[in-house]
Amino acid sequence: MTSRLYDLKAMLPGELNQLVGELEEPAYRTRQILNWLYAKGVRDVREMTNVSKILREKLAERTRITWLHLVRRQESATGEAVKFLFELPTGQRIESVLIADGTRRTACLSSQVGCPLDCKFCATGRMGMIANLEAGQIVDQLLQVNHFARGRGEKVTNVVMMGMGEPLLNYSAVARALKLMRLKEGIGLGGRKITVSTAGYIPGIRRLMAEDLNVGLAISLNATTDQMREQLMPINRKYKIADLLAVAREFFARRGYGVTFEYVLMAGLTDADADARRLAELTRDIPCKINLIPYNETDADRRFRRPSCRRLEQFYQVLRGCRVEFTVRHSRGRDIDAACGQLYHRREK
Ligand code: SAH
């Protein structure tokens, strides 16, 4: 029943305008409602006290406001990462992370409960696919993380769709959420402050590329041969490394800025000198960034290990020798299982 009501938190200003018009109210109501939703963070239309009582009643009949129940919040020892565990009305649980890095405050958001792609090294992959999140549930993660940040006198400056799930397999909800995050009347994040990360679902990349969303795209490359990538990421059976490189070129041509290739370094699997050389070769004439992620170990599968510091250094050295520029992601929050690939949750009894 409730799901048939419009979710106010997922409505774009044009849609809200239309609803306000249908309810025979003046257009400025849209701005007031957005302000209540985003600046004040109300949970109930009845709290929108500068909106006429009649409109509040009409809105209450036709709409609802998504609100995720916060089950737990955990802070890492250094305070650089804060993990939020939310529960959906269905009882399923998802996680979001707030990451501090210099002056940047990044919210890492989930797009699905679990994930269907089954990447062998990823904790979320082991949950299997459970559900797609709604646009309002994606936006609310950001609103609640930002509310917490504001309590510390900070605010979220960046968003990465790198939490649980494959965002491009929940395209319409994710795209709608991204539009909402960019609203000037709302959170007002610039497009390039938002990055969508994909395991390499090419139809989704094409769709995103064609859209005027102006967000950054990261592609989880994670291996330099199809043989290895296929073992680690079953999606590679369908979309191969060469296809990803081609679509990255196309992305630059269409959008005028390059993609980021993420590359997870796993001991004995993806961290050889030969991998570094192949990585340099593969990306040589593609305008792109390379982000290396030393593997974050999880209890569940001991086959995947973080390379030693010496091995990591050596890998970086080979890349430098090939004159490749790259950044290394120092994952925050490993002590609270909030780092890349560690988000995993089963419903607790
Ligand atoms: N499904 C999307 C976004 C989620 S994962 C994607 O695949 O891109 C975000 C990043 O974390 C991906 O680059 C993924 O390869 C990486 N990752 C997954 N498990 C990891 C782990 N245990 N340690 C380090 N990085 C991991």
Image (cartoon, rainbow, N blue to C red):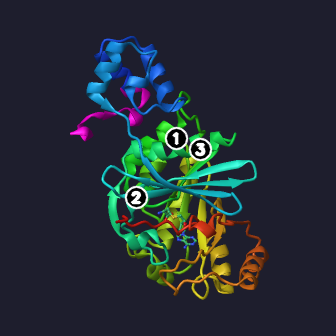
| Mark before the other along the chain sequence, 2 or 3 | 2
Q: Specify whether 337 is left or right of 347.
A: right
Instruction: Classify 7 as above or below 101.
Output: above
User: At which x and y percent is residue 308?
Assistant: 70, 84
The residue identified by callout 1 is: 143
Q: How many numbered tags mark residues here? A: 3
Q: State the quadrant of the C terminus.
A: bottom left
Residue 174 at x, y percent in the picture: 43, 48
Tag on residue 93?
2
Q: Is residue 128 visible?
A: yes
Please determine whether, in this image, residue 196 is positioned above or below residue 39.
below
Question: x, y (%) of residue 179?
Answer: 48, 38
In this picture, which residue range is highlighted in magenta?
A: 1-15
Residues marked 2 and 3 touching at CB (< 8 Å): no
- Three-letter amino acid code at disc 1? Leu
- Relative to the observer, which residue lies in front, 345 or 20? 345
Q: Which comes before the other along the chain, label 1 or label 2?
A: 2
Report how far apart the C-alphas of labels 1 and 2 lie in the structure: 17 Å
Give the overall secondary structure of the magenta segment. Answer: helix
Q: Which mark is residue 79?
A: none
Residue kind at label 2, given as amino acid type = Arg
